[in-house]
Image (cartoon, grey):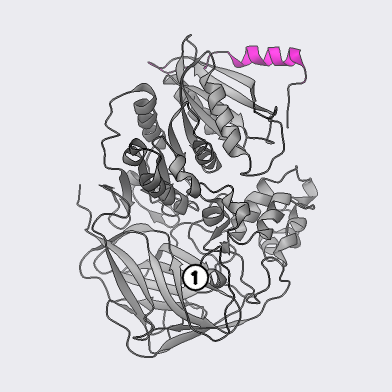
């Protein structure tokens, strides 16, 4: 962590940092104060940069807390824009990162530190006492943590692209470990001490054994940090040691704290963002459990066809210029209303705004799930050979006919490679909507395709797969993708889900399987909004791996992270009248053309 070398350096830096920033017409000049110490209740100081208008006065405050450095590109420029529009902005490094004191331990101290930062900001001479929080990803997560502490000066929150339960929508999805993200973020990007150059492995000059794809194949997972960092990264090892949703994770979950949130919250996310589940659960959580009627009534959510932030094109698909929202404008309307009492109508708009893919247009909705949604089952069936896109797997609104089951072989040494989906942040996988045809020849993917659509079919809401299946071992994974097949053959993944079979009764209730026994599994595909257009086909793919986005289930049943070996699993998926495997689609009215 950097600190000013002495008081003279501090003085010189303070003078230089308060020079006015050039301003455009009708925008105020601002000052930036560097290295402001923010004391925590235990005596640790977190250092902050403070942006505020040059003119003397008391201003509403935005608090932004980051582990990535207060002068990071984009964040710095955004804070300037807020200050030019009449806000004081406090941006501090979280505990143990960059200039701030203390020990870096992801997630663990953000609740109390966030509270202390908010209340410190409210008492400063340039503050009018009203504080809101801003930021995305980890910067959004820390808002949820602080909000649950009910700081008296907090009046609104805008957590974008943020997790609301670190275990359920960061570390895992339905118990399956997000390997590439956890390793890339936890070991490579955010270790608890600086790595030496010989352990860097993302550069072109890295030897084969230090290439990212090689590191992610290392077994056992519990000591994978040694392959890259060269030492034990404690928080990574703690994550591996707690594969279930236990007290370690519940202590930092915001889902158990929604009833303590007493201010309006605006969540924002993307259909292909890694934290989509947190965006949705955060909104629905405060809408249902918020501490007061105002919080429940005035909280908002927006979701675009994005990854980890607004774009026009993502993955292989250009969704048109309307998709590329300028989030600063939405945030400014939100903060102007709650911090400056500007009557701009944002509190009276419908609470949900989502982008419908396929139709490529935005639409406001009254809630999530959308009132009147018809949850409609689409059944899988075949003649016993649904393997590959050229197989005979079918998808229909009618009950199954034909063969009773399909089989495939899942070999962890030859996993299905990640091709699109919900990932982010420099991991070595192709995220977003991607053409699934490169996987078409794999026999370890069951493919079920419907007839061409004759009328537009719109879905918006949670998507789940009811899967009747068996495996010949004590544990395995089930991966499901919902796909929109275009008339030209382009196969776009719409949403996806994975379930670690031992967690079929809940992530806090692991239970191994009996070999060969048929079970009913529910695979959560989180959610989406898509219009299947005439001539398109709806498709469902089922397999058992999604690597390296998720770790390979070794199929051994050993405690998580300890397996140094793998076994091949023989998988069976059933589709009979009694075991009618189906995907449940949230069918809604087709959005109106604007």
Name the residue: 57% across, 79% down.
513
Q: Residue at x 49, y 51 (%)?
A: 275
Disc 1 marks which residue? 479
Number of other residues with Cα within 10 Å of mark 1, as a class: few under 14, some 14 to 19, many 20 or more: many
Quarter location, residue 268: top left
For the residue pair 147 and 336, the one nearer the viewer reads as: 147
Q: Is residue 281 left or right of residue 240?
A: left
Examine the structure image and report whether residue 139 is included in the region drawn in magenta: no
Residue 142 position within the rendered picture, expressed as x and y whole percent measured from the top left? 54, 39
- x and y percent of residue 20 in the render? 53, 13
* Residue 495 pos. (x, y %): 41, 62
Find residue 548 and report its horizontal and vertical position in percent: 60, 63
Residue numbers of the magenta segment: 5-27
Classify 557 as above or below 164.
Answer: below
| Residue under the image location 78 percent in, 46 percent down | 197
Task: Give the residue at the far top of this rendering.
Answer: 56
Q: Nearer the viewer, residue 486 or 155?
A: 155
Q: Is residue 79 above or below residue 219?
A: above
Disc 1 element: strand
Q: Nearer the viewer, residue 308 or 523?
A: 523
Report if residue 18 lies within the magenta region: yes
Q: Quadrant of the N terminus?
A: top right
């Amino acid at each position: 962590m950097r600190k000013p070398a002495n008081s003279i350096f501090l003085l010189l830096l303070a003078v230089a940092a308060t020079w006015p920033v050039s301003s455009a017409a009708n925008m105020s000049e601002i000052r930036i104060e560097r290295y402001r110490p923010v004391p925590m209740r235990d005596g640790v100081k977190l250092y902050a940069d403070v942006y505020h208008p040059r003119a003397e006065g008391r201003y509403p405050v935005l608090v932004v807390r980051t582990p990535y450095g207060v002068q990071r590109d984009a964040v710095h420029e955004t804070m300037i824009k807020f200050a030019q529009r009449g806000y004081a902005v406090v941006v501090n490094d979280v505990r143990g990162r960059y200039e701030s004191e203390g020990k870096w331990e992801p997630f663990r101290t953000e609740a109390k530190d966030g509270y202390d930062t908010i209340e410190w900001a409210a008492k400063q001479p340039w503050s009018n006492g009203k504080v809101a929080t801003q930021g995305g990803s980890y910067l959004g997560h820390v808002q949820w943590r602080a909000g649950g502490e009910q700081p008296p000066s907090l009046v609104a929150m805008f957590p974008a692209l943020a997790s609301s339960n670190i275990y359920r929508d960061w570390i895992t999805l339905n118990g399956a470990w997000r390997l590439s993200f956890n390793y890339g973020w936890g070991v490579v990007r955010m270790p608890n001490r600086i790595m030496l150059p010989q352990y860097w492995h993302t550069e072109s000059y890295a030897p084969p054994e230090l290439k990212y794809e090689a590191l992610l194949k290392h077994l056992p997972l519990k000591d994978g940090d040694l392959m890259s960092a060269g030492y034990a990264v404690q928080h990574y090892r703690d994550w591996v040691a707690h594969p279930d949703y236990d007290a370690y994770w519940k202590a930092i979950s915001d889902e158990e704290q929604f009833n303590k949130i007493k201010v309006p919250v605006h969540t924002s996310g993307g259909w292909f963002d890694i934290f989509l589940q947190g965006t949705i659960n955060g909104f629905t959580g405060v809408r249902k459990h918020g501490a007061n009627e105002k919080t429940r009534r005035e909280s908002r959510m927006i979701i675009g066809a994005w990854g980890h932030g607004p774009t026009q094109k993502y993955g292989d698909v250009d969704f048109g210029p309307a998709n590329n929202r300028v989030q600063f404008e939405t945030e400014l309307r939100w903060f102007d209303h709650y911090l400056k009492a500007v009557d701009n109508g944002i509190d009276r708009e419908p609470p949900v705004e989502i982008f419908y893919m396929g139709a490529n247009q935005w639409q406001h909705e009254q809630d999530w799930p959308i009132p009147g949604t018809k949850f409609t089952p689409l059944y899988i069936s075949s003649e016993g050979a649904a393997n590959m896109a050229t197989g005979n797997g079918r998808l229909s609104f009618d009950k199954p006919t034909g063969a009773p089951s399909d089989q495939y072989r899942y070999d962890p040494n030859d996993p299905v490679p990640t091709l699109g989906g919900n990932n982010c942040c420099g991991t070595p996988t192709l995220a977003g909507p991607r053409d699934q045809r490169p996987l078409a020849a794999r026999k370890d993917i069951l493919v079920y395709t419907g007839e061409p659509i004759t009328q537009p079919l719109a879905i918006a809401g949670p998507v789940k797969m009811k899967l009747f299946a068996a495996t010949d071992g004590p544990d395995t994974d089930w991966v499901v993708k919902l796909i929109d097949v275009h008339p030209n053959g382009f196969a776009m993944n719409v949403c996806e889900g994975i379930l670690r079979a031992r967690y079929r009764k809940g992530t806090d209730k692991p239970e191994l399987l009996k070999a060969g026994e048929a079970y009913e599994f529910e695979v959560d595909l989180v959610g989406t909004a898509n219009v299947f257009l005439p001539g398109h086909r709806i498709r469902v793919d089922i397999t058992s791996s999604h690597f390296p986005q998720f770790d390979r289930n070794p199929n051994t049943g050993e405690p998580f992270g300890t397996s140094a070996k793998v076994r091949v699993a023989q998988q069976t998926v059933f589709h009979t009248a009694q075991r009618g495997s189906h995907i449940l689609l949230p069918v809604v009215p087709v959005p109106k053309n604007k």
